[in-house]
Image (cartoon, rainbow, N blue to C red):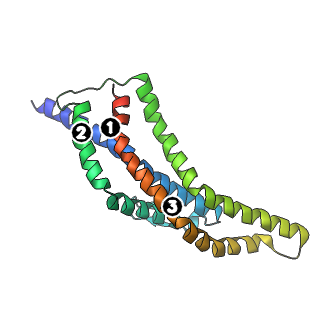
Amino acid sequence: RLIQLTLLGFKEVFVGVLLGTFLGIPLWGLQAAGELIDNQRGISSPTASADPATNSQASAMGVFLGITAIAIFVGSGGLETLISVLYRSYLIWPVYQFHPTLSGPGAMELLGLLDSIMRTALLVSGPVVFFLILIDISMMLLRRFAPQFKASQLSPAIKNIVFPVLMVTYAAYLVESMKLEVTRANGVLEWFDKLLP
């Protein structure tokens, strides 16, 4: 009886980790987007602060977008979705069924999680990174035609002046994008069903 309860406990932890991983994809993707943005604007990791959630080094924009994503997740009904998904997961993998049948396509779905995190990060950070790269190219052209300018010193300053303006204009899209990523959490059971046929 004790072994059976222990196995059930391990199974429930495994299901929780799988569901938490899928529901955490938008949050990790947006934090990775912040890391990409800070990397492009020249904020290097030695000056980065500590992430309060993971107690590891993180960029300021990464922490900001991560916390903003959590606030939007909670504000748009993410906690209710989380509880609903948890309860409905018992229909796919009943309580007393100990082992799943992981298929080949299910394993590919599991690997697709990494792809989803990176895709979210690139889609969210893409426009800002594009404009920051455009500033770099402009500075290179300016240095080419006016050699007296120190482009290596001027570029980070211009990027950090333009960055807040970019983020203010980009904020509406960013919030809508975050809401869209959070509403994707409703599809976690379909993903879970594909993973464990």
Discs 2, 3 touching: Cβ within 8 Å: no
Q: What residue is rendered at 48% in x and 52% in y?
A: 29
Residue at x-position 45% and y-position 56%: 178
Earlier-in-chain disc, 3 versus 1: 3
Measured as percent of width and height from the top left, residue 106 is found at 41, 28
Secondary structure found at label 1: helix
Label 1 belongs to which residue? 189
Q: Judge the density around disc 1: few (<14), some (14-19), many (≥20) Cα neighbours within 10 Å.
A: some
In the displayed structure image, the side of residue 25 where residue 100 appears, left or right: left
Q: For the residue marked with disc 3, what is the amino acid?
A: Leu
Of residues 113 and 55, the one nearer the viewer is 113
**Mark 2 vs 3, N-terminal side:** 2
Q: Quadrant of residue 101?
A: top left
Q: Is residue 72 above or below residue 24?
A: below
Ranked by sequence position, the earlier of labels 1 and 2 is 2
- The residue that label 3 is drawn on is 174
Depth order, front residue of 152/130: 130
Kindly state the secondary structure of the residue where label 3 is placed: helix
Alpha-carbon span between mark 3 and mark 1: 26 Å
Q: Is residue 129 above or below residue 155?
A: above
Q: Amino acid at mark 2?
A: Arg
Look at the numbered disc 2 and give the secondary structure of its residue: helix
The answer to the question of whether label 1 and label 2 lie on touching residues, with beta carbons closer than 8 A, is yes
Q: Residue at x 42, y 56 (%)?
A: 179
Q: Is residue 69 left or right of residue 87?
A: right
Quadrant, the N terminus: top left
The residue most toward the left is 1
In front of the other: 129 or 55: 129
* Above/below status of 82 relative to 62: above
> Badge 2 is on which residue?
88
Residue 42 visible in this rendered orientation of the protein: yes
Where residue 190 appears, as percent x and y from the top left, is 35, 35
